[in-house]
Image (cartoon, rainbow, N blue to C red):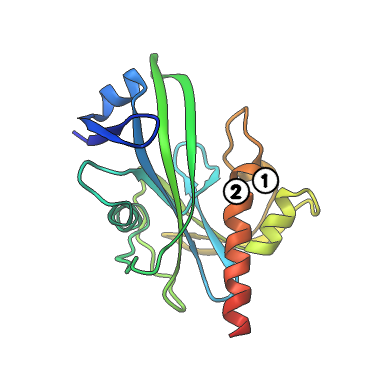
Amino acid sequence: MEILDIYDEYMNKIGSENRDIVHAQGMWHKTIHCWMYDDDGNVYFQIRADSGKLYTTASGHVLSGETVRDAFRREIAEEIGIDLDVTNAVPIEVVFWRQDKIKNGTPWHDRAFAHIYINKLPKNFDKFNFQLSEVNGVVKINAQKCLDLLMNKIAHANATKITQDGHQDINVTIDDFLAASDEICIVKYGTVLQNIINIIKIGHFK
């Protein structure tokens, strides 16, 4: 059973509640969206087990009593198997996320303060250990090419698919990315990609 801290719409904590009740009643809570990149300018998208689509490197709820950075470290460890030092994780933005849908035949209401953070992978790291119930693997793609793809400047981009079985060179298109019916991929992913590109440029300049 997951217990989440709940908030008013101004992000003031007002209590704690079971995750199922939080979503049944549409209570505001915090989530973490973890993005990993490397020194070569690549960003890592997870391959969702349920849809096969590309999404954040790892993501999930911030549990009751956790800091956002605690949640970052836990979700990265759980979903892709990295025990990561998140001291230098960079906060990008907080998105006020609202969604209502039917999930498994039951009304499901999401009211989340989605905290988006980025962090660099250890140099030459590729020893992932995926939580296969959630994640089939990751796709490593150059951040600038990914941004160009989502801006419709190019039709596809070369990438590397990493699974428990090894590495595979693939091409990805905009249709490979996870987005709700009312979302646009460049809006959903563009800000974090641009921030990663900017950080890499600064690092290379130094």
| Image marks 2 and 1: residues in contact by CB distance under 8 Å | yes
**Which residue reaches farthest bottom?**
206
Q: Secondary structure at mark 2?
A: helix
Residue 82, how many percent across, how many down?
33, 64
Within 10 Å of the Cα at label 2, are there few (<14), some (14-19), or many (20+) other Cα atoms? Answer: some
Q: CA distance from mark 2 to mark 1?
A: 5 Å
Task: Please name the residue shown 67% across and 57% down the image.
Answer: 146
Q: Residue at x 41, y 39 (%)?
A: 113
Where does label 1 land, which residue? 186
Quadrant of the rendered image containing residue 181: top right
Which of these two is toward me, 200 or 137? 200
From the image, tell me which residue sits under label 2: 189
Residue flagged by tag 2: what amino acid is it? Tyr
Instruction: Name the quadrant of the N terminus.
Output: top left
The residue carrying pointer 1 sits among few (fewer than 14), some (14 to 19) or many (20 or more) residues within 10 Å by Cα, namely some
Q: Position of residue 156 (x, y in %)?
A: 74, 53
